[in-house]
Amino acid sequence: MARISIDALSKLIKSGDIQKKREAVYLLYGKEPERISKAASSLKKALLQNSDSENNYFRYLKAGSGPDDVGIGEVIAQLNTVSMFGGYKLVWLGHLDKVGKDIEGPLLSYCKDPNPQSALIITVVFDKDSWGNPLAAFERSSLFKEMVKIAVAVLFKTVSKDNLPGWVAARFRDEKLTIDREAMDLLIELCGHDTSRLGSEIVKLSSYVDGKTEVTLEDVEIAVGDFRTDDIWGLINAVGKLDPAGSYAALSYLLKNNTPAQVILKPMTTEIMRIASALDVRSRGESFNTFSAELGGSPYPLKKAWADSAKWTPELARRGLRATLKAYMDIMKRGVSDETGLHAMLADILRGPASPRQTGSVD
């Protein structure tokens, strides 16, 4: 096999040639999680189109010898087992942040002699902020040198500044949208040179402009936050979904970037109030249209609050509002640190420990 470019992989998928030139192993790697995820998903869809779709698809987020890991033996056994539904099997392993010694040998052994009735997608994503250069170390490893001989390997390089507008325009086309130049310039300014953040904001904008075909400057100004000052979207989204790990990770990011507590608390309180209002409308047997008419304003945050409210209860919403008020009073009036007050707020809402340090690492 060989290393191929992202464009070459995209061409194989879009042309349908991926079925004619099906390979047993695909390795997608780099520092671009959003782009790697999108490419792997497209590859998955193309490879499964002539088999019994989801019944032949298996995803393993990681493998290893840790207490929460799936053993690499289980992954390989899945690849080597004949599908009871007929057709090809597809296994996606990743995103891995490294290929440890505990899985390197068995994985390489399988890749050298793969089951011709199965395909394996391996995705390896390296942290952009990691010390040193783990991507370069990976490419120097004996594992990688062997893998490029037996697998299709695709490196997802960071999009250059000059090519970023073209990448953004292409992502909007994927959502069947266009974006005017002023809006694009502002979107890139707000998100920085971060394709993962840009990808998330593009998905958010596609929901926000529901029914329109072009994203305007006004849409970006309303819907997209500035990553340099108040990137709280991830936190609000995770809390709305009652996701403890995601909530603590998002809060840690905000604190690391010195986001003031009041900048976090105001939109958090507003979001929980929206959820409480949605619960009230649901309790009356009314629809989203009633909720939207009663609250007014931009449709995007209302749609999000309405969807999230399905996981909440009135008691939880009241508890959430009490928690945000307590955090405000503790931090602004009683001198409690932002970190302590905000972690306590999440613990009150999510009924978890007050710090992710007490629950292990948050990935």
Image (cartoon, helix red, strand yellow):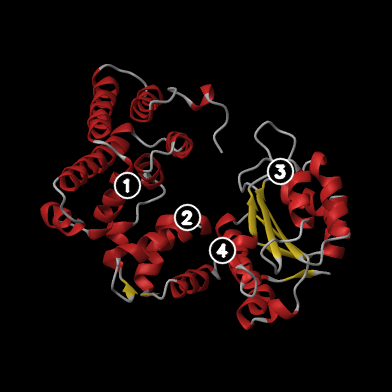
The answer for how far apart the CA atoms under marks 4 and 3 are is 21 Å
Whichever of labels 2 and 4 marks the residue nearer the N terminus, that label is 4
Determine the residue positioned at 47% across, 60% down.
199
**Label at residue 38:** 4
Whichever of labels 4 and 3 marks the residue nearer the N terminus, that label is 4
**As displayed, is residue 41 above or below residue 136?**
below
**Residue hosting label 2:** 197
Q: Tell me where residue 261 sits by quadrant.
A: top left
Q: Tell me where residue 328 sits by quadrant.
A: top left
Q: Give how far across and how far down residue 123 sits, in percent.
A: 68, 55
174 lies left or right of 236: right
Is residue 158 visible to us here? no
31 lies left or right of 120: left
Determine the residue positioned at 76% across, 56% down.
79
The answer for how far apart the CA atoms under marks 1 and 2 are is 21 Å
Q: What is the three-letter code of the residue carrying label 2?
A: Arg
The answer for how far apart the CA atoms under marks 3 and 2 are is 27 Å
Q: What is the three-letter code of the residue carrying label 3?
A: Ala
**Residue hosting label 1:** 308
Few, some or many C-alpha atoms within 10 Å of disc 4 (few <14, some 14-19, many ≥20)?
A: few
**Label at residue 63:** 3
Label 2 sits on a secondary structure element that is helix
The answer to whether the residues at label 1 and label 3 have Cβ atoms under 8 Å apart is no
Whichever of labels 3 and 2 marks the residue nearer the N terminus, that label is 3
